[in-house]
Image (cartoon, grey):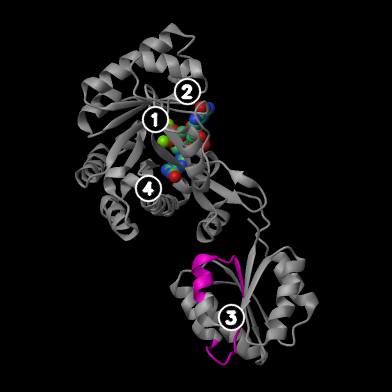
Amino acid sequence: MTDRLMVMDDEAEYAAFVAKVGEGLGYEVRTTDDPGQFRRWLAEWRPSHIALDLAMPQVDGIEMLRYLASQASRARILIMSGFDARVVDAARRLGIERGLDIIGSLQKPIRAKELRAVLDENRSGSTEVNRESLDHALAIGEIVPFYQPKVDLRSWRPIGFEALARWQHGQRGTISPEEFVPLAETSGQIDRLTETVTTRALVQSRQWEEDGMAVNLAINLSAHNLDDEDLADRIETLCWATGAKKEHITFEVTETAAMADPVRGLDILTRLRIKGFKLSIDDFGTGYSSLVLLRRLPFSELKIDRSFVCDCDRSTEARVIVKTMVDLAHNLGMSVVGEGVETDDVAQVLAELGCDSGQGYAIARPMEAQQVPAWLARWGTGGETHA
Ligand code: C2E
Ligand code: MG
Ligand code: MG
């Protein structure tokens, strides 16, 4: 994703001048002098940068700064004005006090060289994954879920998708959650990350439902999300707000996460279940407390970790372990998913062992939301592609 610069200036020639400099530096640019348009683009187009004129006939720049602060905007803001330096500076300080990221203030007439320097220096060109760049990525919508199908291993029918977070970084391309989820967990950003991914996934779920594709969606929760006693309520509110159906949503939690604080974990997960969501225990077999946990927590699905799945076509031990997990889950009334199905042989063995469904590269890699309908159409209802 390239940097996006929104220019708001009522003087058309200034707006065009800023746009030209921005485009020359590789920015995608939109210009407007209409406050309504400004608000819509802020929400929908999500500019990473804003060049704002302080004095316009319809609205003043200070008001726009206040609006940006009320939206908790993380865009990098450049203030421009024909007022004297003291006014421009006061506006800059006001913006900073409101928590905005003011990257500079330029007094009109603006020189191309100065403008180019500010815009060039403040490109989000940094490729480092850190608290600040993640914060920015969350603000401008670079963190999005990809979707990986789970299919029934007997009929090969798709039964749902797992939402897996991806960072679509302007310079580095797609960054794996293994690089930024642990960071979010230690930097205090995991609640925001979960909320971002959950909101997007719920909106998507509702959209697919409207398009006649009622698919189940699984969303991952981190151990750190289970510190928050309001989690179940907040997720329920998001469901109402987006119109997604709770019975289509499953939350995946690892054993380790569920055990971090067993009492609070039990409280939050039980409440999610009571509200109508499903729960899945992820990476099963890699934690320490598997059996105790299965008894205590209201899981509806068990996902066998891919370390057991990947060689179950070649290793007798792996097969015995998988079979034991499948029986255990079924005896407790849960369905079983094998994760990390990389070959058709593995899928075949899992099916023979009684595993209900599979997820893995042999079926499909995680894909962008817009690729899902075509994948579903190609895959059909099952049998045609894989018998
Ligand atoms: P997970 O929840 O166990 O997700 C399964 C991972 O296995 C995904 O990696 C998926 O791309 C990968 N995978 C799927 N099929 C295969 C296969 O056939 N072979 C192999 N080798 N791998 C396969 P991904 O997307 O990199 O996610 C890694 C982990 O990051 C996830 O493991 C999950 O724990 C975490 N994660 C991803 N998205 C989120 C999120 O939105 N929130 C939180 N808290 N954690 C997330
Ligand atoms: Mg998962
Ligand atoms: Mg897993």
Amino acid type at circle 4 is Gly
Mark pair 1, 4: CA separation: 16 Å
- Tag shown at residue 371: none
Numbered range of the magenta stretch: 39-60
In this figure, which residue is indicated by the disc labeled 1?
A: 157
- In the displayed orientation, state which residue is furthest to the top: 316
Q: Residue 371, position in %: x, y?
A: 53, 44
Q: In the rendered image of this protein, does residue 15 appear above or below residue 180? A: below
Q: How far apart are marks 2 and 1 (CA)?
A: 10 Å
Task: Give percent across and percent down for residue 168.
Answer: 58, 50
Count neighbours of disc 3 (C-alpha within 10 A) and say few if under 14, some if 14 to 19, many if 20 or more.
Answer: many
Which residue corresponds to mark 4?
212
Count residues near mark 1 (Cα–Cα under 10 Å), then give few for <14, some for 14-19, many for 20+: some
x 59%, y 65%: residue: 48
- Looking at the image, the residue that sits furthest to the right is 113
* Residue at horizontal 69 percent and vertical 65 percent from the top: 27
Residue type of the residue flagged with mark 2: His
Going from N to C along the chain, the mark reached first, 2 or 3, is 3
Q: How crowded is mark 4: few (under 14 residues within 10 Å), some or many (20 or more)?
A: few
The amino acid on which the numbered mark 3 sits, given as a three-letter code, is Arg
Q: Distance between the residues labelled 1 and 3?
A: 58 Å
Near mark 2 (Cα within 10 A), the count class, few <14, some 14-19 or many ≥20, is few
Q: Residue at x 55, y 56 (%)?
A: 137
Question: Cβ–Cβ below 8 Å for labels 1 and 3?
Answer: no
